[in-house]
Image (cartoon, helix red, strand yellow):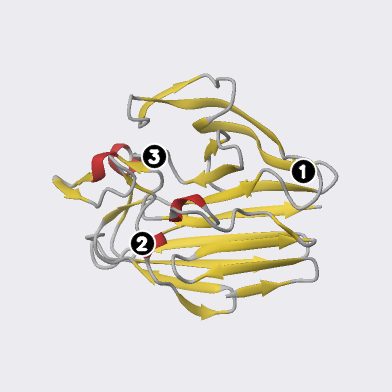
Amino acid sequence: MELISERAKATVDLDGGRLASLVIDGMELLVTEAEKGTRWGSFPMVPWAGRLPFGKLSFEGVTYDFPITSPPHANHGTAMRERWVERGPGHIEAELADPWPFGGRVSQRFELTDEALTVTMTITADDQAMPAQMGWHPWYRRQLDRGESVELTFEAGRIYATDEEQIPTGELIGVPDGPWDETFIDVTQTPILTWPNALTVALTSNFDHWVVFTKPDHAYAIEPQSGAPNDLNRAPHVLKPGESLSGWMALTWG
């Protein structure tokens, strides 16, 4: 699926519901290929985001096991491995199928203009209650086809402390010096990516958790999420039958 404006072009891959490419003023912003599916584009993380420790989910007294996709954990939900269906201009949808035991469906809507891309995602329960979480995992290139290497502007008050498996414990602590692979909260300045002499992109979302990963040499992963990794176990958002959870992210450029 393609969306085109005078200045920009977005390509959505229906295998995984992934934003596969975003070209602005002739420059590709995203990493467009990698050996692992979790290392390129901007893919939806749903019905959970981040690491699910050892592939285990406990909900209403039952423990469920999920395939280990990033040993020893199950990473980033199941919808990025589903085939999505185009339902209308900029609108795609997928069923939440095995190994997710609760059913449900998820949709994304993409809106592109000359100044912005907005993506909205909604997860809806079927006939049984289920825990839910969502977010996006974009990989932004450090270096575009022109200009200088990217600079990040971002301010937040605290991060989640993690255990030896990099799973949040629930404790909130001060922000360390970068490079980062952290989950931030109390954000006072949402991320701004500046490629000097090329482009500036401001990132916003209605979600209040941001995972920021600046360690790779070739890219930054800057991920708005509805909660911290493992919140599906620790502090889930529970959808009753027929209920929905929605969120959006926007990229705005000058």
Residue 142 at x, y = what percent?
67, 43
Q: Nearer the viewer, mark 3 or mark 1?
A: 1
Rounded to the nearest angstrom, the CA distance separating label 1 from label 2 is 41 Å
For mark 3, what is the residue? 229
Determine crowd level at label 3: few under 14, some 14-19, many 20+ residues with C-alpha closer than 10 A: many
Residue 60 left/right relative to 168: left
Given residues 21 and 99, the one toward you in this image is 21
Could you tell me the amino acid type at mark 1?
A: Trp
| 1 vs 2, front mark | 1
Callouts 1 and 2 close, C-beta under 8 Å: no
Front residue of 33 and 127: 33
Vertical comparison of 128 with 230: above or below: below
Task: Kindly identify the residue that appears in the image at 18 percent across and 47 percent down.
Answer: 60
Identify the secondary structure beneath mark 1.
strand
Choose the circle earlier in sequence order: 2 or 3. Answer: 3
- Residue at the farthest bottom position: 88
Q: Residues within 10 Å of mark 1 (few under 14, many from 20)?
A: some
Quadrant of the snapshot with the N terminus = bottom right
**Vertically, is 166 above or below 50?**
above
Q: 211 and 38: which one is in front? A: 38
Q: Amino acid at mark 3?
A: Pro
Q: What residue do we see at 60% from left, 37% from top? A: 217
Q: Earlier in the sequence, mark 3 or mark 1?
A: 1
Q: Could you tell me how far apart the alpha carbons at marks 3 and 1 are, in whole angstroms?
A: 29 Å
Q: Crowding at label 2, few (<14), some or many (≥20) Cα neighbours within 10 Å? A: some
Q: Cα distance, mark 2 to mark 3?
A: 22 Å
Residue visible at 55% across and 20% down? 176
**Which residue is the site of mark 1?**
195
Residue 243's disc is: 2
